[in-house]
Image (cartoon, rainbow, N blue to C red):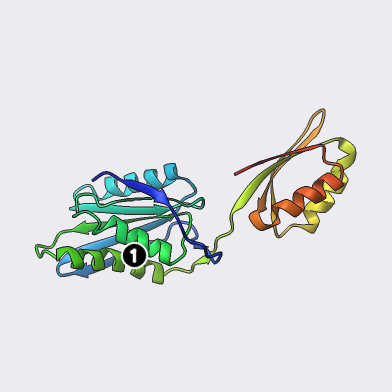
Amino acid sequence: MKSEERSSTTDSNELLTIVGRPPPCELVIKKSKFITNIARVSSVQEAKAFVGEIKQMHNTATHNCSAFLIQDGVMGYSDDGEPHQTAGAPMLNVLDKWMMREVAVVVTRYFGGIKLGTGGLIRAYSGAVVEALSTLDLVEFVQMIGVMAVMPYNAVNGFQYLLAQNSSDVKVMSKTFEEEVVFIVEVKYPAVSKFITDAYAFGVKSIDVYE
């Protein structure tokens, strides 16, 4: 079945994510085995690559249904041959209700010979995701914004002081010393505006912002 993507309408700021890639979680429901794999992903491309990897790993399974929810609200899901809206969409709904971001999940089903019906499939696939999430230590998700700061050499000490003062909100990705000095940093979204204002006050010449 064709994958579908849409935008999130979640308004809460209490967003969560996972760390790395935890081991799979298995459930048996009416003789069908459901195996849930979850991974931290930062883009649609990473999510699709993860889904493809799990499909290859379980290429003899009856279904490999999937859902993902990325930080900017882009979502995707696939029923992978199950009846429409009985697998991928319920899985995505769980991710959204749990306020997850940058997460992809694949639930692999090995059919056990007993049909579950529409309601049973929805409960099985959503329940598999809930069971997997319930075993994990979830962490707060904070969106990071990239900032490229260009400055003359006489502004470097002040900018480094600013970095030290904001060490909990800023991560230095790279720095280049040529005709001018270029710092590329990642800043937690809520702190970006003040950080840029302070950077200009410390003599930074120009700033470019990107996600």
Q: Residue furthest left?
A: 113
Residue 206, placed above or below residue 68: above
- Under circle 1, the secondary element is helix
- The answer to whether 170 appears left or right of 158 in the picture is left
Q: Where is residue 82 shown, x and y percent of the image?
A: 19, 54
Residue ID at (76%, 54%) = 194
Question: For the residue carrying disc 1, how many other residues have a C-alpha within 10 Å: few (<14), some (14-19), or many (20+)?
Answer: many
Q: Residue furthest right?
A: 154
Residue 106, placed above or below residue 129: above
Residues 57 and 114: in front is 114
Residue ID at (32%, 53%) = 66
Q: Where is residue 6 shown, x and y percent of the image?
A: 39, 49
Residues 1 and 26: in front is 1
Q: Where is residue 33 shown, x and y percent of the image?
A: 21, 63
Residue ID at (28%, 45%) = 56
Name which quarter of the figure residue 181 lies in.
top right
Residue ID at (51%, 62%) = 11
Where, quadrant-wise, is the C terminus in this rendering? Answer: top right
Q: Residue furthest top?
A: 179
- The answer to whether 21 appears left or right of 194 in the picture is left
- The residue to which callout 1 is attached is 129
Type of the residue with mark 1: Val
Residues 100 and 159: in front is 100
Q: Where is residue 124 shown, x and y percent of the image?
A: 24, 66
Q: How many marks?
A: 1
